Image (cartoon, rainbow, N blue to C red):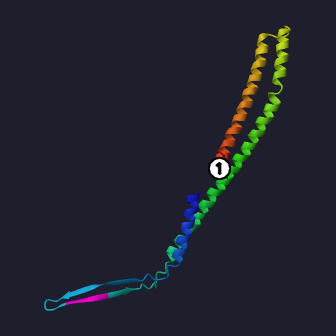
Amino acid sequence: MQILARRAEAAELDSRAAARGWVPDVTLGIGTKRSDNGITRDNGAIVSLSIPLPVFDRQQAGEQRAAAEALTARAEYVLARNRAEGDLRGLHAQTQRLIVAATDYRRDATAAAPELLRIAEAAYQGGESTLLELLDAYRGALEAETTALDLEWKAREARIDYDLLTGSITE
């Protein structure tokens, strides 16, 4: 995300620099010149000054290209930021729903299990039910506990992902 922000800033700076492109690039040259025509030899200093005059090319294409690159980079940054914010909101909502679901399931489904197991054991010991019915009651209680643990694990996993994404994990 920071890469996209820096790329957008660089493109905007390039656009500003291109807008100043109408200022001519002055070149100054200093050197020596030797001339030998067979009879005489001459040595001298030479100074040159070059100033291009932008008569036909006013850097409009470069300026427009830099402005387009700046707009593109800024749009990519905004898109990435919005996507990350959406992911964060979605992960937060998922975490909250999983926590509520795990709490409700633990309260509703597993709270009655000890009483149901006591009734099933009493019915078996009293001869009113078979061993298969008692085992079925134990299996139902075990499945309810396993489901509750699975929901709680998913809620913790979503919370860890959320904390990692927001950087709110304390060590």
Q: Can residue 29 be seen in this view?
A: yes
Q: Callout 1: 10 Å neighbours few (<14), some, many (20+)?
A: few
| In the rendered image, the vertical position of residue 40 relative to residue 165, given as above or below | below
Majority secondary structure in the magenta region: strand
List the single residue furthest toward the left.
Answer: 39
Residue 69 visible from this viewpoint: no
Q: Where is residue 139 in the image (x, y as percent from the top left)?
A: 74, 20
Q: Is residue 16 magenta?
A: no
Screen quadrant of the C terminus: top right
The part of the image, by quadrant, that contains residue 8 is: bottom right
For badge 1, the amino acid type reads Gly
Q: Mark 1 points at which residue?
A: 167
Secondary structure beneath dot 1 equals: loop
Point 76% across, 12% down: residue = 132
Residue at far top of view: 127
Q: Is residue 111 above or below residue 159?
A: above
**Relative to 158, is 37 on the left or the right?**
left
> Residue 153 versus residue 18: which sits nearer the camera?
153
* Residue stretch in magenta: 42-46
